[in-house]
Amino acid sequence: MAAASEHEHLRPSVRVVDTVLVHPSSATSAEETSLPLTFYDVFWLRTPPVQRVFFYRLDAGADVDVILSSLRDSLSQAVGVFFPLAGRLRLAPGTTNRYELHYRPGDAVAFTVAESDDDFDSLAADEPRAVSRLVPLAPPLPEGGAVLALQVTTLNERRCLALGVTLHHAACDGAGITLFRRTWAAFCAGAKPPPEPVIDRTIISDPNGLYDFVCPKDEEVNKSLKILPVDEHLLFGTFVLSRAHLQRVKDLVAASHHGSLRCSSLVATLGLVWSCHQRATNKPGGSGKSKTCLAFPVDHRSRLSPPVPDTYLGNCIGGAIAIASRADLAAAGGLFTACAAMAAAVEEATRELQVLGACDLWRERVVEAAGMSVLSVAGSPRFGMYGLDFGFGRPAKMDIVSVARIGGAVAVEGSRAGDGGVEVGLALPPDGMDAFRRCFDEAITGLDMDVGAQ
């Protein structure tokens, strides 16, 4: 914790050097286009933008000016393919609650170049560091309903870069923006780009009328397009679970349930994190009967009938809501309680897609969870963000810093070691971070002892 406090006193600065508007280069973006938001999309209208920061170390002798120029030029190519991301969110003319992503010729994406006197190695570390140092590395969204903004910040006398990507979630989900980043990186590196996105949103049907449930006509959502402030006292830390640790959790959970519980790597990860988070934030004297929930995304693309293409540019994720008592999560068997609740939530969320009355079931779950404290999850290990190479190497670190803007949230990503492990990022006050780290370290020590005994 000392390192975080020392840098907090230094107050490193980020200075904007230049901001340019990057226009789509492709002729396919020439026509005015309006994409109506689906019920999957409007769910995210009220949420703060998603902000990721990728940290890159450059080779000795790398020409930063050439790199910046290549990033800007290739961004124009990528935005040409993903031209809706240069558009704006707006209320469809003549409607009261029908929103759309509207692109017209001349729309562009803001690309900012900045420089910072902060220390790269400290920023890109796992150790808790002040959120106030990370947030300036990702740009705000321009006013007027913009959905995408990008920033490259040079560090350590231009020997390192931080690439910040800010996205309004109503434009697309993690799979969609991952496809965009991979396309941009391929153009920049001179590699073959991935398949082009499917932009047609009419492939998402809404027979149950979920749109009006998610976005009632009498609700004002324009305020949601403004970014929320961050508590400067928060710390952001990264915690790593190796493949061996995850396998040990799976084995323990399977043994405790006689093999009847399906425990995936994600369930194992979030089960351990959820139980540690509850132990770290559990307040003495609280009601042991009170419940809390973990909300995590489930990709619906392959689960819908007919299936939605993997390359669909939009939102196609539902929410699984795991519910458990605070006391059980904080108890000695909290890991098993958490994993069992999560596995049940995944099965329930999947089953609801296949049965009549799913809309009513989903509404009931949302209403039930509304009065509880919620720990939400961002990101996914399957996105493979540590493979994002623009031609100057893979990232040394990646953080979803926007979880700091949400009270009670964690971010997950596949381990940079590429060994099947998972990284978890979260923001907490200093005392809460200390408590979480103690709980996490105790859990890892226990898993290591179990693995060593085998």
Image: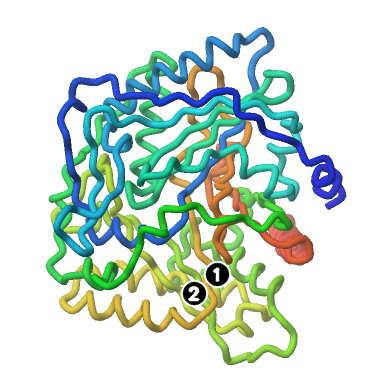
Colouring of the image: rainbow
Q: Residues within 10 Å of mark 2 (few under 14, many from 20)?
A: many
* Point 72% across, 64% down: residue: 436
* Point 66% across, 23% down: residue: 160
Q: Secondary structure at mark 2?
A: helix
Q: Looking at the image, which is closer to me, 424 or 183?
A: 183
Name the disc covering residue 253, or none: 1
Residue 124 at x, y = what percent? 68, 37
Residue 379 at x, y = what percent? 47, 50
Residue 420 at x, y = what percent? 54, 44
Q: Residues within 10 Å of mark 1 (few under 14, many from 20)?
A: many
Vertical relation: 228 (above or below) 53: below
* Point 61% across, 52% down: residue: 425
The amino acid at mark 2 is Ala
Q: In the rendered structure, which disc, 2 or 1, sits on the residue that comes first in sequence? A: 1
* Point 37% across, 77% down: residue: 366
Q: Locate residue 371 relative to residue 365 in the image: left or right.
A: right
Residue for badge 2:
340
Q: CA distance from mark 2 to mark 1?
A: 8 Å
Q: Secondary structure at mark 1?
A: helix
Residue 252 at x, y = what percent? 59, 68
User: Are circles 2 and 1 on residues that touch, CB within 8 Å?
Assistant: yes
The amino acid at mark 1 is Val
Quadrant of the snapshot with the C terminus? bottom right
Residue 325 visible in image: yes
Name the disc covering residue 49, or none: none
Residue 245 image-quadrant placement: bottom right
Vertical relation: 163 (above or below) 38: above
Vertical relation: 141 (above or below) 113: below
